[in-house]
């Protein structure tokens, strides 16, 4: 894959002839192309994946006094998007085996104040998504997919981010398709799309029952140079997706049946994008093991980025979250090895060797 500098050089003629930013020509073209690629009616570009989540919730009329259900096994950015609306995040425990949200717990925590449910597709996984979507529809709730790590993932033949009311994506570096920073929303609902488009531009455009200038909004616009870069990279989506899946498969093969590590295999109807190679750590002090790997150059969600279940995160304690023990265990035992487009096969061999060596040493108490 081209480096950012190489891609910018290739795009220089496009950038040189770019119209005034107020015209938003590149962003508008990117939206059309994203909608076509994903097979939906509307795509709305924004400045980040977090902005996409915030904008989607606002489009769904989420606000103070509302509640939003989301998995305790999530990144803190998802929680921040909920609290930015003034709504209260309600954490749902993980299903057995840490696979998606527990439907029984979600149902028990659904109240008359619940406005939406946010499934989070960590590491590109969509465990239990179809069943959760059916539940949301049965009780009249919006399903806002956090698909920021799931570009290209599919379940039962359907693309992640197109199963719920709105799908939210990131274009940050490291994603399957990126532009350095940015994000977008997908939806088939014209009214929600109009509200999202209005909100991301200070409500300078109208939406049904909300004329231009009648609401407060944000500046969540995607910059034109980043939109141009995303358009260029979008043309390579299939190639980029195939490469990421190839990287994950190679790493699984190289690590093999290492004692203490169990591959987190996808469900029979799921086809993840290979965003991260994913294992369950069955060793003592799994979080410390992931930290040890990070210190040895194996970047991973827990050891490098300090992922922890949201209800245990220091920044969430003021929310008085209920315990979610299965989610806590699932996150603590998660080894999600970070893959990048530029990671070479030689580097993957080195990562696998390090993982095997450290797992053996850890099991032996060294």
Image (cartoon, rainbow, N blue to C red):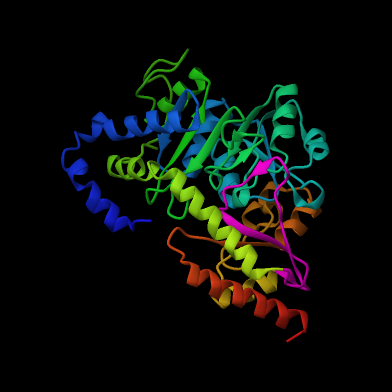
342 above or below 63? below
- Residue toward you, 134 or 255: 255
Judged left or right of residue 20, residue 24 is: right
Specify the farthest residue to the bottom.
366
Residue, x 28% and y 44% (percent of image)?
Answer: 225
Judged left or right of residue 161, residue 29 is: left
Name the spot of residue 313 as percent of width and height, x first: 66, 57
Residue, x 53% and y 45% (percent of image)?
Answer: 148
- Check the picture and name the quadrant holding the N terminus: bottom left
**Residue 304 seen:** yes
Name the spot of residue 364 as percent of width and height, x first: 77, 84
Residue, x 56% and y 72% (percent of image)?
Answer: 351
- Residue toward you, 318 or 114: 114
**Residue 302 seen:** no
Residue, x 58% and y 59% (percent of image)?
Answer: 248
Dominant secondary structure (helix, strand or loop) of the stretch shown in magenta: loop
Span shown in magenta: 257-286
* Residue 276 part of the magenta segment: yes
* Residue 354 part of the magenta segment: no
- Residue toward you, 106 or 13: 13
148 above or below 285? above
Quadrant in the picture for residue 221: top left
Name the spot of residue 274 as percent of width and height, x first: 57, 53
């Amino acid at each position: 894959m081209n480096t950012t500098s190489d891609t910018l050089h290739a795009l220089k003629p496009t950038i040189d002839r770019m119209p005034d930013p107020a015209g938003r020509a590149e962003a508008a073209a990117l939206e059309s192309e994203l909608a076509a690629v994903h097979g939906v009616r509307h795509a709305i570009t924004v400045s980040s994946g977090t902005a996409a989540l915030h904008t989607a919730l606002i489009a769904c009329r989420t606000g103070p006094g509302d509640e939003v259900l989301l998995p305790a096994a999530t990144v803190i950015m998802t929680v921040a998007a909920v609290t930015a609306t003034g709504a209260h995040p309600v954490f749902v425990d993980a299903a057995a085996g840490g696979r998606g949200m527990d439907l029984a717990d979600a149902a028990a925590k659904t109240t008359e104040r619940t406005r939406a449910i946010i499934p989070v597709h960590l590491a590109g996984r969509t465990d239990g998504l179809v069943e959760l979507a059916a539940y949301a529809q049965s009780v009249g709730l919006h399903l806002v997919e956090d698909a920021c790590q799931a570009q290209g993932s599919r379940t039962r033949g359907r693309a992640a981010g197109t199963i719920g009311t709105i799908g939210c994506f990131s274009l940050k570096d490291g994603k399957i398709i990126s532009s350095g920073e940015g994000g977008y929303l997908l939806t088939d609902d014209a009214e929600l799309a109009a509200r999202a488009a209005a909100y991301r531009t200070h409500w300078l455009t109208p939406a049904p029952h909300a004329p231009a200038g009648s609401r407060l909004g944000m500046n969540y616009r995607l910059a034109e140079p980043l939109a141009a870069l995303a358009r260029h990279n979008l043309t390579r989506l299939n190639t980029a997706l195939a490469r990421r899946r190839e990287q994950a498969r190679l790493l699984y093969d190289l690590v093999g049946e290492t004692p203490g590590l169990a591959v987190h295999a996808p469900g029979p109807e799921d086809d993840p994008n290979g965003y991260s190679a994913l294992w369950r750590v069955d060793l003592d002090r799994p979080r410390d093991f992931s930290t040890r790997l990070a210190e040895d150059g194996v970047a991973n969600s827990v050891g490098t980025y300090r992922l922890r279940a949201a209800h245990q995160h220091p920044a969430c304690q003021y929310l008085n979250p209920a315990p979610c023990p299965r989610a806590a265990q699932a996150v603590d035992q998660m080894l999600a090895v970070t893959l990048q487009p530029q990671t070479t096969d030689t580097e993957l061999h080195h990562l696998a060797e390090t993982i095997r060596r450290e797992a053996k040493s850890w099991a032996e108490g060294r």
